[in-house]
Image (spheres, grey):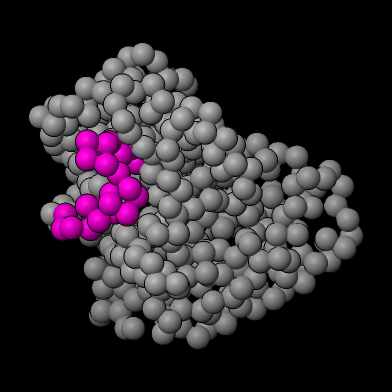
């Protein structure tokens, strides 16, 4: 892959660049805009679905690698670090730093975009390796930070404060820091003295989704929905901060037959929360479909031949989207629901309150718990397609103004001008 005459050679680095998690999806949008601007892009990660000819895979970059997972488990459950853990961290840092160096050299890269690996320590050695490599080479870097370790309770008891302060994120002159919400920008400055550029999540609102074919109908049939039965979509990973029990409670209180479809797989926090949700759904008598294996960004087939539906199919098959998150870095699924013109039930999480709600979206909002009003409005939307059309058209217009690819394009042009000394635009 060659850049255009004014294009640059840019490498994306992450623990994974694959699937429907928010980091991978947002990185793909940056990729789309950068390639459209004439830049050549390459990829380094532990798991990926990117073209092999421009990709390097290093298993130890994934947070699920056994050695990395063992370091993680020790680092964030103890207050004193065993010397053996320190030694293993150093060994992996050396290995990963060499992998980064080879990646840069093999593809003659001019800039790295690090997707969350310098913000949240899911892979501690990777963050340290990147920091050392950047400090030793001065290579220009854009740190795209989706969430910081201090935003997650599970990272606050640890035996690696020295590493966290060094690399998550690093305070280095060649690193430009990008955050996705105003609170992260404020906290980054207060905690580290680093200034960050706010670039929110985006969708390609200039190009609406194609009209649905028979895929959404087939998905509803495969799930076993009866005629007249409603489908609510929970388009998130199965992790505790997503507040999915609120969606289950909402369905249990509806006066209409309805099910919940969870479109993403479990996350990096183990199976306990999914087990809790299964218990709650049985207790409340709600049918919940955990379908992370058969819903992916694009259609395809599983290894055993089952139909894989795209995220677009899941949205088109649904009647209402639930977004009851307690904590979010921004709200990628919120924008997706607007893009696919679906009404939304949303919890008033902090970033929604500070960054998103002021834009003027029309949603069903609750504040920490489901109320009778939440139930009433949801039932009304299920029965009133004209109101749904009015709300979703308004939301699409608002989002197109504030969260479009054009907004991202302007920010990236300015960032690259700052890095390479070129005039913006």
Left or right: where 129 falls relative to 380: right
Magenta stretch: give its range: 212-233
Residue 267 coordinates in the image, percent (x, y)? 55, 51
Q: Quadrant of residue 347?
A: top left
Say which of 316 and 100 sits in front. Answer: 316
Q: Is residue 11 above or below residue 372?
A: below
Q: Residue at x 10, y 29 (%)?
A: 386
Q: Is residue 220 magenta?
A: yes
In this figure, what is the number of numbered marks? 0
Q: Is residue 198 above or below residue 84?
A: above
Image quadrant occupied by the N terminus: bottom left
Say which of 193 and 45 sits in front. Answer: 45
Q: Furthest residue to the top?
A: 372
Q: Residue at x 36, y 13 (%)?
A: 372
Residue 31 coordinates in the image, percent (x, y)? 34, 65
Residue 63 coordinates in the image, percent (x, y)? 62, 61
Q: Is residue 51 magenta?
A: no
Left or right: where 279 falls relative to 206: right
């Amino acid at each position: 892959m060659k850049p255009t005459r004014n294009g640059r050679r840019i490498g994306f680095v992450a623990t994974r660049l694959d699937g429907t998690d928010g980091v991978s999806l947002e990185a793909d949008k940056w990729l789309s805009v950068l390639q459209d601007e004439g830049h050549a892009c390459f990829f380094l990660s532990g798991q990926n679905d990117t073209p092999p000819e421009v990709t390097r895979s290093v298993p130890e970059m994934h947070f699920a690698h056994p050695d990395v997972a063992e370091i993680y488990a020790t680092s964030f459950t103890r207050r004193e670090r065993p010397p053996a853990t320190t030694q293993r961290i150093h060994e992996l840092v050396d290995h990963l730093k060499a992998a980064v160096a080879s990646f840069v050299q093999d593809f003659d890269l001019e800039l790295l975009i690090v997707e969350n690996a310098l913000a949240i320590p899911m892979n501690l050695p990777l963050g340290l390796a990147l920091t050392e490599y950047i400090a030793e080479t001065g290579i220009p870097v854009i740190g795209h930070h989706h969430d910081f370790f201090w935003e997650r309770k599970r990272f606050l008891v640890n035996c690696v404060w020295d590493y966290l302060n060094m690399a998550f994120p690093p305070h280095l002159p060649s690193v430009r820091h990008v955050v996705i919400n105003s609170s992260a920008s404020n906290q980054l400055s207060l905690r580290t003295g680093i200034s960050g550029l706010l670039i929110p999540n985006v969708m390609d609102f200039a190009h609406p989704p194609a009209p649905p074919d028979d895929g959404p109908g087939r998905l509803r049939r495969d799930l076993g929905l009866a005629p007249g039965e409603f489908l609510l979509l929970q388009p998130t990973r199965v992790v505790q901060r997503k507040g999915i029990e609120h969606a289950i409670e909402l369905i249990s209180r509806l006066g209409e037959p309805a099910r919940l479809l969870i479109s993403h797989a479990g996350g990096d926090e183990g199976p306990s929360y999914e087990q809790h949700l299964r218990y709650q759904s049985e207790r409340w008598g709600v049918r919940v479909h955990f379908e992370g294996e058969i819903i992916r960004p694009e259609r395809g087939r599983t290894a055993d031949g089952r139909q894989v539906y795209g995220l677009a199919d899941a949205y088109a098959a649904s009647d209402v989207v639930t977004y009851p998150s307690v904590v979010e870095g921004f709200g990628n699924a919120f924008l997706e629901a607007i893009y696919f013109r679906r009404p939304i039930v949303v919890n008033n999480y902090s970033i929604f309150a500070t960054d998103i709600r002021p834009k003027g979206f029309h949603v069903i909002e609750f504040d920490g718990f489901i109320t009778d009003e939440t139930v009433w409005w949801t039932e009304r939307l299920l029965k009133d397609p004209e109101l749904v059309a009015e709300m979703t058209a308004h939301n699409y217009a608002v989002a197109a103004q504030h969260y479009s690819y054009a907004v991202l394009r302007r920010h990236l042009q300015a960032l690259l001008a700052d890095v390479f000394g070129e005039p913006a635009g």
